[in-house]
Amino acid sequence: MTETVGDWLRLVHDLYPPAQAASWDAVGLQVGDPDWPVERVLVSLDVTTAVVDEAAAEPRTLLLAHHPLLFRPLARLTPDTAAGRVALRAAVAGVAVAAAHTNLDVTGDGAGTSDPVAELLGLTDVRPLTTELRDATMLKLVVFVPPEAVDAVLDAVSAAGAGEAGDYERCSFRVRGTGTFRPVGNASPYSGEHGRDNDVDEFRVEVQVPRSRAGAVVRALLAAHPYEEVAYDLFPTVTGAEVGFGRIGRLPAATRLADLAARIRDDLPAPQLRLAGDPDREIRTVAVVGGSGDSLVPAAIGAGADVLVTGDLKHHVVLDALELGLALVDAGHHATESAALPAWIERLSTAASARGLRARLLRSATRTSPWS
């Protein structure tokens, strides 16, 4: 059976739900068709012309990037803008492009973009720097079904992907009750009399539905349900899991700021590293934000961090942070995030094997850091 872009998107979205991406973000499929066949998945931090050309060197390649190619809608698909030029090149070459951005940043599976530095420094008691309730990966489907049709409806929605919980399938909750209605006009009711108030025996059936399967599940429900007008609802759910940007933890032993920065510079590696603060300051608590983290300076200060390790720090943000007692290490956007790619690829590979997906999964060999 041929694998498709859609098969790989479902895998990525189940691991890193689009609902957990920031509201301003653009994730998922950006170029291509979900029905395109896939024989190779090329993972990259960025989407550039050189990366697209690397992907196009072999047919049936899905380019899976961390940074989205398209952040904002394009008024036209022409080579007049950088994004338009690269997207047009990918489309002409038949290269599908997809992104997992902030939904990957906040993941708790160890493949997040803030995890490599936390692991490199051996931080303990690690937790997200920011935490919030987010929409979960699941929706709750509630539908009202006559008793004799419950099994058929459950079979249909389960086959479409609903009702799974770990190693359990066809999971549901049901409670019996009374449905009321009055058929009028051209209605042709499954039961009851036309033009009169009717009371019928029904079950309220509840099942969990992955967001990525919601459309397929609703189609299966409508096809299997005996009513001509099916009463159903899909409710978003909320998770209390600690989902958030960045990481914060404690060093195994206090160290000088200069020594901590040197370790990050050499071991990450981060050759363009910059340091702000007293080099001899004693550091115990470290906040880490992969990529661009200056917006989380207040969070790091509020969490009691001695230093924030991140990238893309702006001049006045650094001055203000120093005034408020926070040291800063700017290790660069590329260095702090590219270090997460091996763990991300490993996570994708494990999940793909479990689903029987056989496309070759590999890291792009193209260097995308703009700095030399």
Image: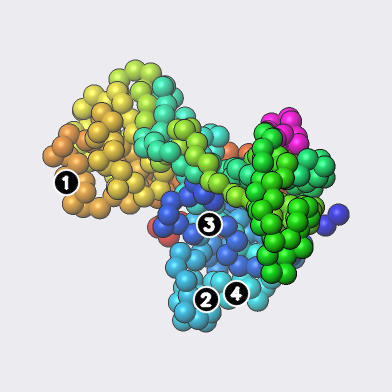
Q: Mark 1 points at which residue?
A: 319
Quarter of the picture containing the N terminus is bottom right
Q: Nearer the viewer, mark 3 or mark 4?
A: 3
Query: Label 1 vs label 4: CA separation?
Result: 42 Å
In percent of width and height, residue 224 lies at 80, 52
Residues at discs 3 and 1 in contact (Cβ within 8 Å):
no
Place of residue 105 in the rendered image (x, y in percent of width and height, measured from the top left): 47, 44
- Residue lying furthest top: 253
Residue 125: image x %, image y %?
41, 22
**Mark closer to the chain start, 1 or 4:** 4
The amino acid type found where label 3 is placed reads Val
The residue to which callout 4 is attached is 89
Residue 344 occupies quadrant: top right
Compared to 188, does 242 lie above or below? above
Q: Which one is closest to the eye, mark 3 or mark 1?
A: 3
Q: Which residue is drawn at 43% across and 38% down?
A: 133
Badge 4 element:
helix
Q: Mark 3 points at which residue?
A: 27
The residue singled out by tag 2 in the image is 85
Helix, strand or loop under label 1: helix
Mark 3: few/some/many CA within 10 Å (<14, 14-19, 20+): many
Q: How crowded is mark 1: few (under 14 residues within 10 Å), some or many (20 or more)?
A: some
**Residue depicted at 50% across the width and 81% down the height:** 76
Q: Is residue 159 left or right of residue 260?
A: right
Q: Closer to the camera, 73 or 105?
A: 73
Three-letter amino acid code at disc 4? Arg
Of helix, strand and loop, which one carries label 2?
helix
